[in-house]
Amino acid sequence: MDLYPLWNSVRIAGISTAIVFFAGISSAYCTAKAPRPVKAVLDVVLTLPLVLPPTVAGYLLLRILGPKRIIGRWFLASFGIRLTMTWWSAIFATSVVIFPLMYRTARGAFESFDETLAHCAKTLGLSDTYIFWRIRMPFCRPGIMAGTVLAFARALGEYGATSMISGYTPGRTATISTTVYQLWRTNDDVLAFKWVMVNMSISFAVLLALNMLETKNKNAVSKR
Amino acid sequence: MLSVSVDALFGTFRLNVNFEAGNETLALLGASGCGKSMTLKAVAGIITPDTGRIVLNGRVLFDSSRRISLPPQKRRCGLMFQNYALFPQMTAEQNIYAGTSRLPESERRKEAESMLEAFGLMDLRGHYPHQLSGGQQQRVALARMLVSRPEVIMLDEPFSALDTHLRFRTEQEVRKVIRDFAGTVIVVSHDRDEVFRFADRIAVMSEGRIEAAGTKHEIFADPKTRTAAVLTGCKNISRAERISDGEIYAADWGIRLSLHMKDYARFAGIRMHDIEFAGDSDGENIFACNIAEVVENAFSFVVMLTPLDAPEGNMLIGWEMAKDEWRKIHSGSGMLRVQLPAHKILQLS
């Protein structure tokens, strides 16, 4: 059994999660602080990928990244790089799809922060940087970690947008999910089942970790 | 010395307060939502008033005309929040250490250590806030505030988060902190007894303004306004109308009182324990009353009275006395005579 799809899936999920970790947290922090009307619009735009079918997200991405489209053409002309049909093209697709998961959990964490803690810290002479990194972030850490795990789990399972933007090339762009589809299509039931089991066990482990995180968080909150 | 004169509009709520406090304890007494906490936040720099001036020991903290508004970090105003606002992810020791940020690096550890010691927190230093009782949390909050070397300390409802039976002991600790503190202390509370035990002077607040201010004895003896009377615990208050120079009609009680009414007075009030038993004696403002209800408190009786010639639907007058006293007076009859001494009647605007 060629393990390339496993390696490819994990690396795509890992890199996308890392990107979304920073992008999601910073957008969550900005929207939590934004004035109400701006917040409402931003929130809809940033959450949209959660409810769109991944194929729609994939279609929209192809519309801008494809070799004949605005950004794709420019990249091809300037750097000779094709943005689609490579293993890392899937990172675009996956990042867009998992972004809302990170964004929404982080925003929830930021909004549950008790602002009097920040106010109090200021009266004690503590700097805004200190307050952000030593008081606000530790308070929000459990929520942010839960969002990260959830985003990673979803990234591992991404199929729709990924298959459109990266396609399926064995040993190059194949991920677990595209491999399962390909194997099923070609009637290789035994191998397909093996990959299904691999995927299930990873997802199981990740969700178990998420559950444990949430229990720990709940305990800390109820004791407070 | 703290002098505050600010005006701010928050939505429909207007805060407009002016006061000065020397090296003393000033209490802001008021019902919830009257702007007490907001006043503290304005002094600490957490909210910014629209106009006004705040000066602490000669330093201008805020002056709208000169566009000065120091950040809270530079104001040196210690503020203890109602819920103590301990940092939940830090131990008691780390919380106190966080308060030392204004000190030179070499002294921070030592100062935090001596605060732990002074507040009897050595054994609890490694505990997180959720592992501490309410009283212990308050001690950490006090220590953390004091170690930040504030020039004024402000306590926002310091005991409201504690169970009643814990308050008495904790109050002693807070009183000690206040006694030892060299600068101005401001305590915010809605509890008249608490305020009386803590403050030298009292400012009564209502709807964003200071209605009455004075020493605590002045305020309790002559609250001058209806709000101040209610907040200082006066339970019997009636509308008052002038009849002649020496007589008023207390409309809600349905009785005439011999009293020289002051110009500003619109209400008359009498504290429940200021009413006296008249027996058969004669004198001013003595009324025969029916006993409507006798309420037994843990350590006193409250007798609800309705004057004999009062019209239907009048407001009952409450009369509170020690249990022994009531047992002596009570004859079993449903009627008795009481006196509302003229010098005990509060005239309120």
Image (cartoon, coloured by chain):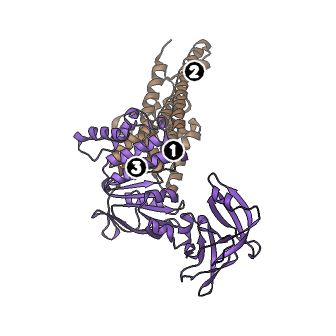
- Choose mark 3 or mark 1, whichever is in front: 1
Q: Colour of chain B?
A: purple
Res B246 visible: yes
Mark 1 vs mark 2, CA separation in Å:
55 Å
Q: Which residue corresponds to the image point at 55% horizontal and 30% vertical from the top-left? A: A215
The secondary structure type at the circle numbered 2 is: helix
The secondary structure type at the circle numbered 3 is: helix
Q: Chain A is drawn in which colour?
A: brown
x and y, in percent, of residue B31 in the image: 54, 61
Check the residue under mark 3 and report the chain it is in. A
Q: What residue type is labelled 3?
A: Cys
Mark 3 vs mark 1, CA separation in Å:
24 Å
A82, above or below B139, in the image: above
The secondary structure type at the circle numbered 1 is: helix
Residue identifier under label 1? B166
x and y, in percent, of residue A99 in the image: 49, 38
Q: Are marks 2 and 3 in contact (CB under 8 Å)?
A: no
Mark 2 vs mark 3, CA separation in Å:
47 Å
- Choose mark 2 or mark 3, whichever is in front: 3
Residue identifier under label 3? A120
